[in-house]
Image (cartoon, rainbow, N blue to C red):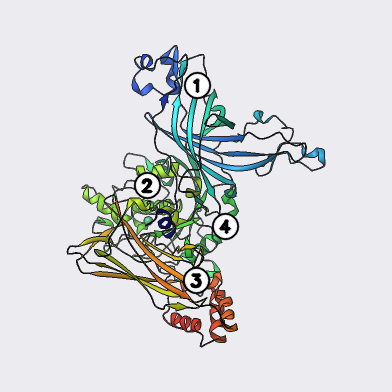
Amino acid sequence: MNKELFARKTGTRHIPISQPLIPQPMSRAGAIDEQTIIQKVNTEQILEHFEFEKLWPYKFCGIKAGCWEIEFTPKTKAYPIFNHQQTRYKGTLRVERDGHAHTISGDLYKFRQYLFELEKIGIPVKATYKWQNAIYRNELGSFSRYIPKKKKCPVHPRNKYHSYLEGTNILYSYFSRSEKCSFTLDFDQWYYTHPASGFDGDFNGTADRSIRMEITEVTSTNFIGTVYIGTTKIGDVKLWWRSSSFRKAHLEIFTLEGAEHPPTTVADGNGGTESFETIFETAGWNLHVTRNTTKVPLPASLSGTDINECWDWDDLHDIMDSTPGYDNSELEKKWRVFLVSVPATLGCSRGVVFDQTTGDTNSIDREGSATYSHDGFNASHSSNFGAAEDEMMKDWPRGFLRSAAHEVGHAFNQYHQPQQNSIMCPTPSVADAIAASGETFPEDIDLSFNDTVRHKLIHQPDPAIRPGAMDWSAAFGVPEADDVNFYDSHDLELKVKTNKGNINIGEPIEVSWTITNKMTEAVRIPGNIGPDQHTTRVSVSKPNGDILHMRLPLDAHDEGHNPLPLAAGKSTSSETMLFWSRKGFAFEQPGRHEVNVILIWEDSGVFFAVESSTEVWVNYPISERDNEIAALMMNDDVGRFILTGNQKRFPKGMERVKEAISKHKNHDVSKTMIRLLDKKTSKTKH
Ligand SMILES: [Zn+2]
């Protein structure tokens, strides 16, 4: 399949990320021969800025690891006398060092600043600065004196997000002690396209431009320099070291009355303790945890809910909304996620990142996750739970803490890892991995992120990680079409069918897909091909050429990544209803549509896919009642109601459907809705 079409149909979201680099010595007149110096020191000391005393009279230069504040001021034309505005980029640069390897990534936020004294034209000026439309009293022409006061890794408003910096090359200097260290840092810059509303935007599939920063130290925690494209100077840059942690986030934990608090600490087996804080330290983060010891009551909106059942995602959202101090405008100032502990019961999957797709009732993704204190380690999920088998998490603190931290990891957009003993593996996989290495569950649970997740948590772009930005589906990457092996339909056939060939505007359609192994041997396909698996990608191509990838509710604990054999000659099927997704309606225009299904999976590092399509004709409205029905049905609340079948949550949607049915009982749309309501399409249990 064509690369661009494949990306659009699968809803691919490219997320750039920096990779480790080995810094190279800068070639420079007067520089000392590197070999001469290397002979004087052992390898570990190279690049260790703070060990240079041993190198007298020379020194090597290094960039301190951690979070740096960055400010990039592009060169601008001469200012007119009034309306002195200047664009300025503020953000962070993360420098991670592992031996010689350096990984450098950054994020820029775009601001406009007024460069003149507003008082002179009669506008009152606040004493404190604000980055948004920042006003600098008495700072005209003297920005260089500005040094931010708060020495912490800065956080900027989401709507100001501009671009990601992917470090691609580092040159370092090694000079005599009397000289200042200098570096050349190369970056690919990736612009972020914001959506019409919200913050769930996208990066292009390729970098927008390459820039080079030539920086020189002022002190070991402050660099200044110049930014170039090729040989053209495009602006100035300043860097201030802020913290040894790469990112800072806040976790607010609330426990529902009737549930148990997640453990504050557990023993590490060596006389110390482990906690949410130490778990996130393994990813270089500074996680600030607020543990609310007073349990929260069930909000009135949920009265009658059985708290000992598996939970609806949107009910968990209600609990989050009801917690004292909940205010989502805080997301502009800090990275904050909620963890709510509810009881639930054995078999509910131990926890969930509820704040996504249909569970996200305010379109601010990944604000919260939940942990289930009275759920636990049921034997049907793994035979390796040992003494904890069929017991509740609340009685096994190490398992409880692990599982709760796993859900918080989801809220920071991290996805499952292959079977191993690390935080982002599902609990049964952890138990199986522990058993395979001859250890004991839950005592030998490793409370740390693996290298893959650590790398992402440190270096993925801010919007991919920070709560309330790119949605949960962004965690599920799809490779480019060129890197995917498509099965020939003579070998592995996918058939897509709809329940009707013609529909009216405002009418949902049922689509089903069947995969058949036509070969003489078993073939491995995704363990589950349901619509809530990240391996299943459904899209609708519209008459005007638009392609809408239907972002269906994803099961955070899906099995799509677990390939299982499909015997020769055998088939397996699944289905869903197409009407609405968070990105729009499937069928809102009359004319020919194509419904496409792609199943894509990874098996031992290789990507495989099957794809197929079917056509759907959407009738032109010809009567007044066609228009009346369309006007009632083409509504987001109706969409959410149809997607979830949840009339309690979306009563307005339900009312509009009822109105359509009562006004035009014999209309095709009403007939379809009557049939669907009879089916009681409750998809809210997970
Ligand atoms: Zn999970």
Please tell me whether mark 1 or mark 2 is closer to you in this view: 1
Is the residue under label 3 in contact with that under label 2 (CB below 8 Å)? no
User: Tag on residue 587?
Assistant: 3
| Amino acid type indicated by mark 4 | Pro
**Residue assigned mark 4:** 324
Q: Secondary structure at mark 3?
A: loop
Please tell me whether mark 2 or mark 3 is closer to you in this view: 3
Local packing at callout 1 (Cα closer than 10 Å; few below 14, some 14-19, many 20+) is many
Residue 477 on image: x %, y %: 40, 52
Distance of label 2 from label 3 (alpha carbons): 53 Å
**Residue assigned mark 1:** 181
Is the residue under label 2 in contact with that under label 1 (CB below 8 Å)? no
Of residues 24 and 145, which is closer to you in this image?
Answer: 24
Q: Furthest-bottom residue in view?
A: 666
Local packing at callout 3 (Cα closer than 10 Å; few below 14, some 14-19, many 20+) is many
Please tell me in which quadrant of the rendered image residue 369 appears: bottom left
**Residue assigned mark 2:** 266
Sequence-first disc among 3 and 1: 1
| Amino acid type indicated by mark 1 | Cys
User: Tag on residue 650?
Assistant: none
Please tell me whether mark 4 or mark 2 is closer to you in this view: 4
Is the residue under label 4 in contact with that under label 1 (CB below 8 Å)? no
